[in-house]
């Protein structure tokens, strides 16, 4: 709160200015530790210092080490001032006292909460406040052949029903498969896709008190849907690799993938070229592709989107004034630079300003993506598709986040128990009732 009295006035004036009497240095932990991404963050730190006089020490951290490093630093009273971290840490760190929840919530409010994607805000709610500042995110997508859908008069795949209708109409193997579903049980890709499909129908194995028994009716709907798309897939153990290859060859009507496919679809990465024609740099497939991020099942028509959201957390050991200025800079004057660190996987969770509501979406769409060649997404995809790509953050969700049970949900997912039982159902080894009973029994034993 002490920061707000002096900072909001400067912020509302429309530019970030120094409010400190002398220069200070803060430490910033970031898991964006690849050399090119670090260089962009160093450049942002230099710009912030030029604007305010305060310096930022950018410290790269391996994502797999972040939890242990933060816990040790907290115990020693030596946390950095700001941490860039994933959704999984927000509520546990808030409860442990590692985050300065009040300051983070004040920053969000000063930036105008309404300018953020509602899903990203909802996933960080703690004791009536926003425990960390949403920075960027991405949502899993149904990637589909819009040209084939349009030619067949099919609705976009925004529901179980629409997807099944499209499969029935377009499935014509081996020249065209209706879907390429994840079926390799020991791959995290199958876990991620299944969580999205369960969420779409409003089904979760966790509640506020821990394990939440799966509803048999809704879960049976999930199982039947997944069996349908799996039976309309090529034979074999399928995961992200085959999913991408088959779609890129023009032999799949739909797949589920992350947005990191967007530049590859447009022929910008030599290691993963579209093979729909003889030109690996062609944008033909991108021009024929549609995107859906939120889809729903019969028990949850509003649908859901599986999302990975990243946050800035001002910590309980922070120099609150300077840390708040740095986070605000990164989310306002420097926000386009923040997104440019890896634009294909950093969708803007802050849409714009009150007076220019799509400012950051428009800026992001013009950022170059790609590896071997570069082009802005706005040159590759229509404004409607761009809007759909970021729209998933409106309904962003994950098992256990709202219930404060993300840790338990993660253990359930990592056990791959759901994968194995779903695969048994797909292979007609068990019926739906047996599958639900097996999942409930197995999940209840995970602590």
Image (spheres, rainbow, N blue to C red):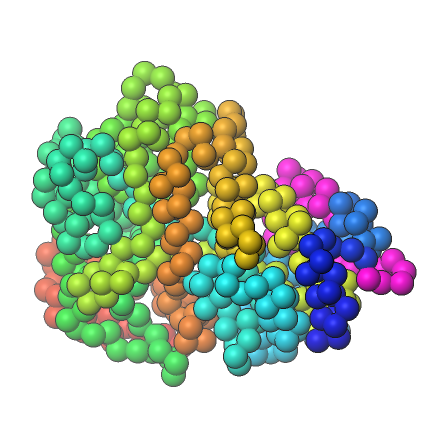
Does residue 247 appear to the left or right of 349 in the view shown? Answer: left
Task: Determine the residue positioned at 35% across, 78% down.
Answer: 207
Q: Position of residue 115 (x, y in %)?
A: 52, 59
Can residue 339 be spotted in the picture?
yes
Image coords of residue 99 (percent x, y) = 64, 72
Residue 346 in view (yes/no): no
Is 26 rendered above or below residue 400? above
In the image as oriented, which residue stretches furthest toward the bottom?
209
- Residue, x 82% and y 62% (percent of image)? 19
Q: Is 340 located above or below residue 87 in the figure? A: above
- At horizontal 81% and vertical 53% (from top left) the residue drawn is 52
The part of the image, by quadrant, that contains residue 24 is: bottom right
Residue 38 sits inside the magenta stretch: yes
Q: Is residue 395 left or right of residue 308?
A: left
Residue that appears at 52% across and 27% down: 374
Question: Relative to residue 325, is residue 361 drawn left or right?
Answer: left
Q: What is the quadrant of residue 283 in the picture?
A: top left
Q: Quadrant of the N terminus?
A: bottom right
Tell me residue 291's x, y (percent): 32, 43
Quadrant in which the C terminus appears: bottom left
Task: Give yes or no for residue 316 being in the magenta stretch.
Answer: no
Residue 307 against residue 98 in the figure, above or below = above
Residue stretch rendered in magenta on the structure: 19-45
Please state the horizontal and vertical placement of residue 102, each as a whole percent of the image: 64, 75
Residue lying farthest right?
Answer: 22
The answer to which of 73 and 416 lies nearer the viewer is: 73
Q: Is residue 234 above or below residue 292?
A: above
The answer to which image quadrant residue 322 occupies is bottom right
User: How many marks can you see?
Assistant: 0
């Amino acid at each position: 709160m002490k920061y707000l009295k002096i900072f909001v006035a400067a912020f509302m004036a429309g530019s970030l200015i120094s409010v400190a009497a002398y220069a200070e240095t803060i430490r910033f932990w970031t898991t964006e530790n690849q050399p090119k991404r670090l260089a962009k963050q160093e450049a942002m730190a230099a710009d912030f210092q030029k604007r305010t006089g305060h310096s930022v020490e950018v410290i790269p951290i391996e994502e797999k080490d972040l939890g242990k490093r933060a816990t040790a630093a907290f115990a020693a009273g030596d946390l950095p001032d700001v941490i860039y971290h994933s959704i999984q840490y927000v509520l546990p760190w808030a409860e442990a006292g590692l985050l300065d929840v009040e300051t983070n919530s004040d920053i969000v409010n000063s930036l105008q909460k309404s300018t953020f994607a509602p899903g990203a805000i909802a996933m960080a709610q703690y004791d009536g406040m926003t425990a960390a500042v949403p920075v960027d995110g991405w949502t899993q997508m149904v990637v589909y052949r819009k040209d084939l859908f349009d030619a067949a008069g099919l609705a976009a795949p925004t529901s179980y029903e629409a997807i099944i209708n499209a499969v029935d109409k377009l499935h014509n193997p081996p020249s065209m498969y209706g879907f390429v579903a994840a079926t390799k049980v020991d791959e995290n890709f199958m876990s991620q896709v299944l969580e999205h499909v369960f969420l779409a129908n409003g089904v979760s194995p966790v509640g506020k008190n821990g394990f939440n028994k799966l509803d048999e009716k809704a879960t049976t709907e999930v199982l039947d849907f997944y069996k349908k798309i799996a039976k309309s897939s090529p034979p074999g153990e399928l995961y992200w690799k085959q999913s991408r290859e088959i779609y890129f060859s023009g032999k799949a009507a739909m797949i589920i993938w992350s947005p990191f496919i967007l530049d590859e679809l447009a022929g910008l990465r030599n290691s993963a070229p579209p093979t729909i024609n003889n030109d690996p740099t062609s944008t033909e497939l991108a021009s024929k592709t549609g995107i859906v991020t939120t889809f729903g099942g019969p028990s949850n028509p509003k649908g859901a989107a599986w999302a990975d959201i990243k946050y800035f957390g001002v910590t309980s050991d922070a120099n609150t004034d300077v840390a708040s200025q740095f986070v605000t800079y990164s989310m306002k004057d420097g926000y386009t630079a923040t997104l440019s660190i890896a634009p294909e996987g950093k969708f803007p969770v802050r849409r714009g300003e009150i007076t220019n509501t799509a400012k950051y979406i428009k800026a992001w769409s013009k950022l170059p993506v790609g590896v071997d060649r570069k082009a802005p997404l706005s040159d590759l995809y229509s404004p409607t598709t761009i809007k759909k790509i970021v729209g998933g953050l409106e309904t962003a969700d994950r098992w256990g986040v709202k219930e404060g049970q993300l840790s338990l949900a993660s253990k359930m997912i990592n056990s791959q128990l759901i994968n194995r039982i779903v695969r048994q159902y797909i292979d007609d080894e068990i019926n739906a009732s047996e599958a639900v009973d097996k999942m409930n029994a197995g999940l209840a034993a995970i602590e």
